[in-house]
Image (cartoon, helix red, strand yellow):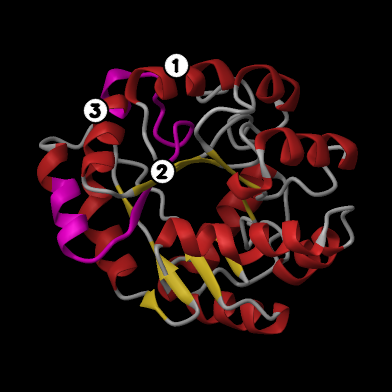
Amino acid sequence: MIDFHTHMFPEKIAAKTLRFLSERCKTVPFTDGTPGGLAASAEEAGLECSVVLPVVTNPEQFDSINRFAGQHREGRILSFGGIHPENEDYKKKLLYLKDHGFLGIKLHPDYQDTFFNDIRYKRIISYASELDMIVSVHAGFDPGYPDCVHCTPDMAAEVLDDVRPPKLVLAHMGGFLRWDEVEQKLVGKNVWFDTAVVFGQIPDEQFLRICRNHGTDRILFATDSPWSGQKESLSYFLKMDLTEAEKAQILAENAKKLLTL
């Protein structure tokens, strides 16, 4: 079983970072935010692997964040790389990530203060796709930025139409708290959704409807750990009215196909 959306931080800044984000987002973390905390959480939940999605919040962080991420690309933790839309020479930076073994990148339009249909994102996604890299993006509402949604289903649909990326993952079932729009604008398109922090937020019947109409072969189990519990999220998911074959797709098979494991 694979968790396709998690976060961790270097031990020296993990406690401070979690305090800041907890206060900003008015939430309580389920781990201490360290690699060890994530590994222990995954082991307790019985997860084979946690995909880590680092967020580069300013262009100057590219080197330091990806150095840290590069130390965690095997075992129970598999980290993607990160890039900022204001990074100059984005092709060189994406090539660096590809050459250093990263299977994908994370984009976060809210924390990067850039709308998802910005041409800089489109260029990054286009070239990442040329390199056969996965692109995971925060989609929909973010409690840290409650006044503006930087990745709406409309914006995501525009990127899909203009760039046609084969490995784009829209987190939070296509758009956190924007699921009616997800059903109208995104369901059925060539894109992946992950389940990060949606259980207990999206009505179960809407979750199941999106899974069935979009295709359970395009849904990835995810938690957004430490912002939800891996064990708790897995327990919730396993009670869903899905067949065992559909659960197997969402929990493992889809992720392994996307990661080519």
What's the amino acid at mark 3? Arg
Which numbered circle lies on residue 158?
Answer: 1
Is residue 52 in view from this perspective?
no
Magenta stretch in the rendered image: 93-121
Q: Position of residue 110 (x, y in %)?
A: 49, 32
Q: x, y (%) of residue 174?
A: 61, 34
Amino acid under disc 1 = Glu
**Crowding near the residue tagged with mark 3, few <14, some 14–19, many ≥20 C-alpha atoms within 10 Å:** some
Q: Give the numbered dot on residue 101.
A: none
Point out which mark residue 167 bears: 2
Report, in whole angstroms, how far the alpha carbon at label 2 lies from the one at label 3. 15 Å
Image quarter hosting the C terminus: bottom left
**Residue occupying the point 65% across, 71% down:** 31
| Residue 142 screen position, x and y as percent | 61, 35
The numbered disc on residue 123 is 3
Q: Residues within 10 Å of mark 1 (few under 14, many from 20)?
A: some
Q: Residue at x 77, y 62 (%)?
A: 233
Q: Are marks 1 and 3 in contact (CB under 8 Å)?
A: no
